[in-house]
Amino acid sequence: MKTILVVDDYEIVRLYHSMFLTQKGFRCVPACDGKEALTLLKQQPVDLVLLDMVMPNMSGADLIRHLRAQPEFAHLPILAITSEAKHAEEQFGSHAHNLRFLLKPVMPDTLIAQVRAMLGIEGTPTTAR
């Protein structure tokens, strides 16, 4: 079972994403900001980070920079959720390996498709033709 670190300062958003992803077969670990995420990452391995970009204490942008500077996390898949995806993509162009941005509001089908794609999971649902 793949583990996803869900990082968002809003508890209801963490709960929503965690419940949805758990229903889809993932194990979720919640974190309220970048600082808590760093602590949790040192305690347990995860397969992907689902990250809000705007948070107190340590923003998503700061967390991305911090993770990419550490060899053990340099290639950790990060799926960042933002209201300014184009700006974020421009900001992290040189660190974009295994980094994708989703524009708010994120639709459930888009979220699960991106999570599966980043984790290399086959069996993404398709629509009938």
Image: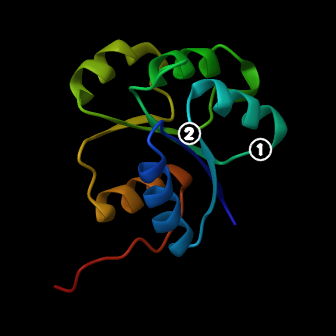
Q: Residue furthest front?
A: 11
Residue placed most toward the observer, 124 or 88: 88
SS state under label 1: loop
Residue ranking furthest to the right: 43
* Residue 111 placement: quadrant: bottom left
Residue at 44%, 42% in the rendered image: 10
Q: Quadrant of residue 45?
A: top right
Position of residue 63 relative to residue 98, above or below, is above
Asked if residue 11 shows in the view, the reply is: yes
Type of residue at label 2? Pro
x, y percentage for residue 117? 45, 55
Q: At which x and y percent is residue 75?
A: 62, 31
Q: Which mark is residue 106?
A: none
Which of the labelled discs sits on residue 45, or is there none?
1
Circle 1 packing at 10 Å, graded few (<14), some (14-19), many (20+), is: few
Work out whether residue 33 or residue 67 is closer to the camera in this orientation and state it.
Answer: 33
Q: Residue at x 38, y 26 (%)?
A: 54
Quadrant holding the N terminus: bottom right
> Mark 1 is on which residue type?
Pro
| Apparent side of residue 112 relative to residue 97 in the rendered image (left or right) | left
- The answer to whether residue 116 is visible is no
Return the residue at label 2: 77
